[in-house]
Amino acid sequence: MKVKTQRLNVIRQLISNHRVGSQEELLNLLETEGFSTTQATLSRDLKALKVAKRPDIEGGYAYVLPEDDDQRGEDENGDVFPVSGLESIEFSGNMAVLKTRPGFANSIASVIDNHAPFEVLGTIAGDDTILLISKEGVSRPDVINALSLFMPGLKKKLL
């Protein structure tokens, strides 16, 4: 649980900060960060993060993270959907209540369910409230980290 979330965060960081052209290179970088994993697991992680390979200026190809330009636009604070519709998150046990702007709850819950993070069992949405149920034993920071993988700016908004 926790290891997967941490590994996904490290993979994002490595791809953002290094030119990585192969899974073998990424496996080596992960090992230097203290993560020993298999090529099959890394392949699944890359798929979960929606990592793509694109031509790079040095010739060859390099891994890139999905760009935020497929989001639905920024609000007045510079936040993009789905973070732009989120107002707050409150936890109680393995449940979280996400308050949203009116009319945003169903869309945000759909984004969460479609990404299906390991830490989340599911969501139930109304007009401006989402009930998120996390798996047993998953910590609050793990849930936030998992959501922030596909909701850029989430951590900054919650501070």
Image (spheres, helix red, strand yellow):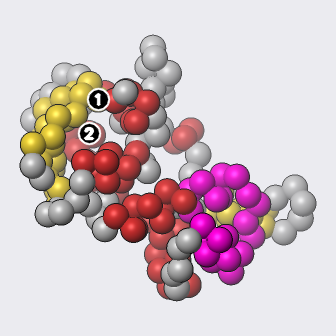
Where is residue 90 drawn, in percent x and y?
17, 34
Where is residue 71 drawn, in percent x and y?
47, 38
Q: Which mark is residue 138?
A: none
Q: Between marks 2 and 1, how big is the CA–CA gap?
A: 11 Å
Residue nearer the viewer, 152 or 114: 152
Q: Is residue 65 left or right of residue 94?
A: right
Placement of 140 over or under 71, stated as above or below:
below
What residue sits 65% from the left and 71% below the top? 32
Residue placed under numbered mark 2 in the picture: 107
Magenta stretch in the rendered image: 11-33
Mark 2 residue crowding within 10 angstroms, few (<14) / some (14–19) / many (20+): some
Looking at the rendered structure, the kind of residue marked 2 is Ser
Q: Is residue 143 visible?
A: yes
What residue sits 78% from the left and 67% below the top? 61
* SS assignment for the magenta stretch, majority: helix
Q: Is residue 131 visible?
A: no
Mark 1 residue crowding within 10 angstroms, few (<14) / some (14–19) / many (20+): many
Looking at the rendered structure, the kind of residue marked 1 is Leu
Residue nearer the viewer, 119 or 86: 119
Where is residue 147 drawn, in percent x and y?
35, 48
Placement of 85 over or under 65, stated as above or below:
above
* Mark nearer the N terminus (2 vs 1): 1
Q: Quadrant of the N terminus?
A: bottom left
Placement of 113 over or under 48, stated as above or below:
above
Residue placed under numbered mark 1 in the picture: 86
Residue nearer the viewer, 134 or 77: 134
Secondary structure state at the residue bearing disc 1: strand
What residue sits 25% from the left and 48% below the top? 140
Q: Is residue 144 left or right of residue 10?
A: left
Q: Is residue 27 magenta?
A: yes
